[in-house]
Image: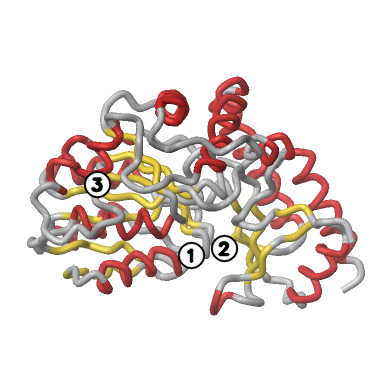
Amino acid sequence: MPKAKLMIPGPVEVREDVLKAQARPMISHRDKEYSDLQGGIVSKLRQALEVKGGHLLLFSSSGTGGMEAGVRNLVSKRVLSCVCGAFSDRWYKTAQSNGKDAVALNADWGKGNHADEIDKALSKGGFDAVHVTHSETSTGVLNHLDEIGAVLKKKYPDVIYLVDAVSSMAGVPIRMEEWGIDFVFAGTQKGWGLPPGLCIVWASDRAIEKAKTVANRGYYFDLPKYVDMNAKNQTPETPAISLLYALDFQLGRMLAQGMANRYAVNLRNAQRVRGWAVERGFGIYPEKGYEGITLTCVSNKRGIDQGKFVKALKDRGYLISDGYGDLKGKMFRIAHMGDLTEDDVAGVLGAADEVLKTI
């Protein structure tokens, strides 16, 4: 059978030329050839993410490695864990499993983590870090990082600001330096349009200085060690060289296209899916003003059999996702990130209309 086009929240569809970019001969990760590769990637990442300062680091891991790195390196007292779904809850549990004093600030699923609620929680004192999930993949919520950053800069300047951007980076603008973010990470299998296995991290100078004061940072994700090796355009451990070939190639494509153009395509696709959902009698799961841009979570207000719906769409060549965890059957997710086009979104919505006539 032909492969169904991936329109799930990751891994995403990967272009053939990006896949082929991985098929280059291996090189030594301690030779100049590798250092030139990593140095070029970091330079392109700075252009793509529009950052001048700080440190761009490359982990050979999933995004969860970024979560663990953040809490191990940057929490010494207490962290406020902003939870609004399954993946932000994973960060809270990751902090706990690493022995950190973590306090969960829970929003109802479908609601965002609001800046005023974070302000109220931090006002109790004792926190040296807060972590926020930008795009909560389980609910489709897109939190307002700028508003949260404004509160932190004004009232809590000593609190380190950590962000999970796994399903938003490269799909939505993130102004790390402008918004006062100290640590942000994303896996490559979503907005970057690559296979899984790399985690892109940006850390502020302030974050690295803080990390140097934190005990028991672990071995694999020791941020100061990464920064030291990054100065040589190398990584402490053996990197995923094939994936870096693909990232280098993809960055060239993305910069040629223009990041603003990529963001605009994602936004148009999100608006189209939302409009389709409402017109067909469904709903939008996230609260108004917090709707995701790289994926849309559609409330099953029509009460259709989602299992049949997802399977029938797959038979027609498109793979979407059912609801996550307790939301299975109550909401379905259509992703429009990476290199998915407006034609791809038109195709899946057209197929969905055909399926809706039969179930």
The answer to whether any part of residue 49 appears in the image is no
Q: Distance between the residues labelled 1 and 2?
A: 6 Å
Residue drawn where x is 25% and y is 57% of the image: 219
Up-down: is 69 above or below 332?
A: above
Q: Which of marks 1 and 2 is nearer the N terminus?
A: 1
Picture disc at residue 110: 1
The answer to whether any part of residue 4 appears in the image is yes
Q: How many labels does the image show?
A: 3
Is 315 situated left or right of 150 in this image?
Answer: right
215 and 302: which one is in front?
A: 215
Residue drawn where x is 36% and y is 33% of the image: 175
305 and 315: which one is in front?
A: 315
Tell me whether circle 1 and circle 2 mark residues in contact (CB < 8 Å): yes
Q: What element carries label 3?
A: helix
| Residue type marked 3 | Leu
| Residue type marked 2 | Tyr
Q: Earlier in the sequence, mark 3 or mark 2?
A: 3
Up-down: is 177 above or below 352?
A: above
Label 3 Cα neighbours within 10 Å, binned few <14 / some 14-19 / many ≥20: many
| Residue type marked 1 | Gly
Is 247 situated left or right of 311 in this image?
Answer: left
13 and 296: which one is in front?
A: 13
Q: Which colour scheme is used?
A: secondary structure
Q: How far apart are marks 1 and 3 (CA)?
A: 33 Å
Q: Earlier in the sequence, mark 1 or mark 3?
A: 1
Residue drawn where x is 41% and y is 60% of the image: 64
